[in-house]
Amino acid sequence: MRTIREALAAIRRAPVLTGLSAAMVALALFVVGLFAVATYNLHQALAQVEERVEVVIYIHDDVREAELRLLEEDMLGLPEVQGVRHVSKEEALNRARTDLPEFEELFLSMEANPLPASLEVELAPGFRNPLSVERVADRTTIYPFVEEVRFGRDWIDRLYLLRRIGGIATGILGTAFAVVAGLIIATAVRIAIFARKDEIQIMRLVGATNGFIRRPFLLEGAVTGTLGGLLALGLTFLATAAVSRTIFPLEWIPGEWALGGVAGGGLFGLVASAFALRKYLREV
């Protein structure tokens, strides 16, 4: 109880400094929160796209039924493959007529069907990433009757690149702002230590240990960091709601991410205070 009373009293004595420290923590976590929302929504979009990822194998017209059956069985034997569907030349033409009605006259004027037959390879969950897709596509190169293999290599690579960039940017910017916030918290702790210099010296004279003296300062730092985390969470929610209403819809981050951000703010404040105490308490 004494630790809590001392920490709350210190916050009341310097509300502006506490508010500034909390605001800097909030700014750091707000930047991280914005990138977390962006990264999460990008991940969700990628997950939806991954469900439609497939490898399409186009076949020469002169392929024999036994050869085609061998390729199907080979594909189904791969751990990355969930299913294989044969699309005949006639079905491919019917699909083209349905998907491209503006070219109906062109299709009717053709004397022969120019579209090739194909195998549509459905990938299993967990194997819809660029590496797995490429491994399945490379497997078809041993068959001379395969004309072409398509799987949208470029846009799959771009989506995964965007997700990596989002994660890296979150880490770099969050770290930069965290350093600034840590310096401000350390400064606030230093000011508090020197403001209570006489009190700390008296406590030492009566036998108080360094741990006993540190606890209120550590709790003060944790409270400041937690307040910053809560403020950042509110700002991130408002920013997400504003973008969803005015530009395009965004999904809110999972609850455990939000709680982790608030807890991270408290932990950050605690660690920054601990470093400041280790450095400045010796000077008193």
Image (cartoon, rainbow, N blue to C red):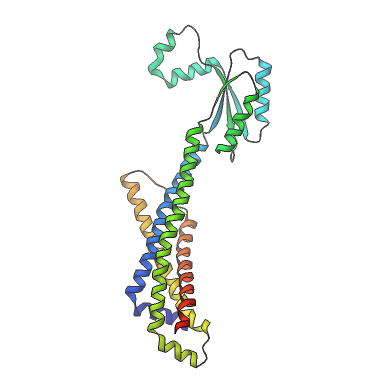
User: x%, y% of residue 17?
Assistant: 34, 73
Is residue 114 something that shows in the picture?
yes
Q: Is residue 249 above or below residue 155?
A: below
Q: Residue, x 44% and y 51% (percent of image)?
A: 169
Q: Residue, x 52% and y 83% (percent of image)?
A: 210
Left or right, 59 with reference to 167? right
**Quarter of image, res 280:** bottom left
Is residue 1 something that shows in the picture?
no
The foreground one among 78 and 86 is: 78
Q: Give the position of the C terminus as an image quadrant.
A: bottom left
The foreground one among 108 and 171 is: 171
User: x%, y% of residue 68?
Assistant: 65, 19
Q: Residue, x 39% and y 80% (percent of image)?
A: 192
Q: Residue furthest left?
A: 246
User: x%, y% of residue 282?
Assistant: 48, 82
Q: Residue, x 45% and y 69% (percent of image)?
A: 269
User: x%, y% of residue 212?
Assistant: 51, 83
The foreground one among 111 and 129 is: 129
**Quarter of image, res 84:** top right
Q: Residue furthest bottom?
A: 206
Left or right, 263 with reference to 238? right
Q: Residue furthest front?
A: 283
Left or right, 60 with reference to 106? right
Q: Is residue 166 above or below residue 118?
A: below
Q: How many marks?
A: 0
**Quarter of image, res 197:** bottom left
Q: Is residue 102 above or below residue 186?
A: above
